[in-house]
Amino acid sequence: MTVSEDEALRLVVSLHRLLRSLRRAGGPLNIPPTQLIVISQLIEFGPLRIGEIAERVPCSQPTATTSVASLESGGYVYREPDPTDGRAIRVLVTDAGREVLQSVAHSEAAILVERLRLLPDEDVVTVLAADPVLRALTRE
């Protein structure tokens, strides 16, 4: 199947608008979205070096460094020497980091549930069926 760039652009804009509206409806965040992604990557993949974080987020290495510094000052992550290379540092998530990500995710999920209840059942089935496909698109 051929997908036009306009169709892809409309989908990208819709996804951004949905995520932004869920974030806004969930209340003020004290953690920017990039930092939430850093936490989620650390939870999913375990300890990572700054360069690995930058690749997985994706963002620049200076952005990853700044994000980790902010998260560390908030108690959401900590750094330790890499056991395989004493010159390198790896970043690990704390329990507080896990809790804040879970709190944000649950809040946004609750809002999404309320919005899905407003849709016809067949639309809800379609949206929920898109989850595995969207997950596949996030893998590079």
Image (spheres, rainbow, N blue to C red):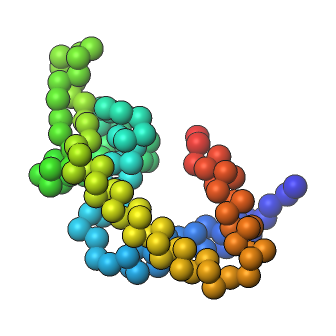
Number of marks drawn: 0
- Furthest toward the bottom, the residue is 118
Tell me residue 11's x, y (percent).
66, 69
Q: Judge whether residue 97 can be spotted in this image.
A: yes
Name the residue at 41% across, 62% down.
105
Q: Which quarter of the figure has residue 131?
A: bottom right
Specify whether 37 is left or right of 127. left
Which one is nearer the viewer's eye here, 1 or 129?
129
Tell me residue 60's x, y (percent).
35, 47
Quarter of the image containing the C terminus? top right
- Furthest toward the right, the residue is 1
Q: Which quarter of the figure has residue 33?
A: bottom left
Name the residue at 12% across, 52% down.
73
Q: Judge whether residue 66 can be spotted in this image.
A: no
- Furthest toward the top, the residue is 84
Which one is nearer the viewer's eye here, 50 or 29?
29
Specify whether 19 is left or right of 9. left
Name the residue at 23% across, 46% down.
95
Quarter of the image containing the N terminus? bottom right
Q: Which quarter of the figure has residue 29?
A: bottom left
In the rendered view, tell whether residue 120 sits above or below residue 63.
below
Specify whether 38 is left or right of 55. left
Tell me residue 47's x, y (percent).
31, 32
Specify whether 75 is left or right of 119. left
